[in-house]
């Protein structure tokens, strides 16, 4: 599901857009009761966590959006920096360079991936409080890098082991 990118997109704006578009997609072809499994990489994992929390918060207000939370069966995280990534600052630099050409980038979203990001902290806290309330016991699987980057010193892995895990007791883990 693609989202509308605005000049100053935030994780929350993208998450809200994801929930809205997913609900529209599911209501159009009568699949509104089918379980949902999210698969997300990097920043996408943060967006999915925020989207699920947003959908949960819609109970009693916009129940059609809350249904996304109710139908969520699982989330698979691939290299998601739940606590940030030291290499995110390199991504910001690359985005700045790309912005001189034709490529469009969003520095605010990239800043979210940095270690110590307040936005990452907010999303992680909200997600961890949401997990016990998931209707069917949301399954979480996190895949982390098995080997460090080669040729880019002094960096090792793009997402260090401590950051690549949600930290929930029932979280499944694997190396890729």
Image: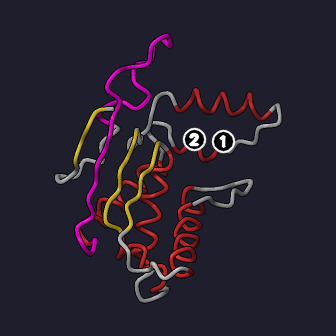
Q: Which residue is mark 2?
A: 111
Residue in the picture at 58% in, 26% down: 90
The answer to which quarter of the image holds residue 176 is: top left
Circles 1 and 2 in contact, beta carbons < 8 Å: yes
Closer to the camera in the image, 172 or 59: 172
| Drawn side of residue 100 relative to residue 4, left or right | right
Q: Which residue is mark 1?
A: 107
Counting from the top left corner in percent of width and height, residue 109 is at: 60, 47
Residue 75, numbered label:
none
Q: Magenta stretch: give its range.
A: 134-162
Counting from the top left corner in percent of width and height, residue 87 is at: 50, 27
The answer to which quarter of the image holds residue 122 is: bottom left
Counting from the top left corner in percent of width and height, residue 108 is at: 63, 46
* Magenta span contains residue 104: no
Residue in the picture at 25% in, 47% down: 167
Magenta residues: mostly which secondary structure?
Answer: loop
Q: Residue furthest front?
A: 29
Q: Quadrant of the N terminus?
A: bottom right
Q: Residue furthest bottom?
A: 60
Dot 1 lies on which element? helix
Q: CA distance from mark 1 to mark 2?
A: 6 Å
Q: Is residue 94 above or below residue 3?
A: above
Q: Is residue 168 above or below residue 58?
A: above
Dot 2 lies on which element? helix
């Amino acid at each position: 599901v693609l989202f509308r990118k605005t000049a100053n997109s935030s994780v929350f704006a993208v998450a809200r857009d994801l929930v809205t578009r997913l609900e529209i997609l599911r209501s159009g072809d009568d699949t509104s009761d089918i379980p949902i499994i999210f698969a997300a990489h990097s920043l996408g994992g943060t967006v999915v966590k925020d989207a699920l929390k947003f959908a949960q918060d819609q109970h009693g207000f916009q129940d059609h959006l809350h249904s996304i939370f109710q139908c969520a069966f699982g989330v698979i995280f691939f290299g998601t920096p739940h606590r940030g990534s030291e290499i995110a600052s390199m991504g910001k630099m690359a985005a700045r360079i790309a912005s001189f050409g034709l490529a469009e980038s969003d520095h605010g979203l990239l800043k979210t991936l940095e270690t110590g990001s307040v936005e990452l902290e907010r999303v992680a806290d909200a997600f961890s409080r949401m997990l016990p309330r998931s209707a069917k016991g949301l399954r979480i699987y996190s895949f982390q890098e098995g080997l460090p980057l080669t040729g880019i010193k002094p960096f090792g892995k793009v997402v260090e082991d401590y950051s690549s895990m949600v930290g929930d007791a029932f979280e499944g883990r694997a190396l890729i």
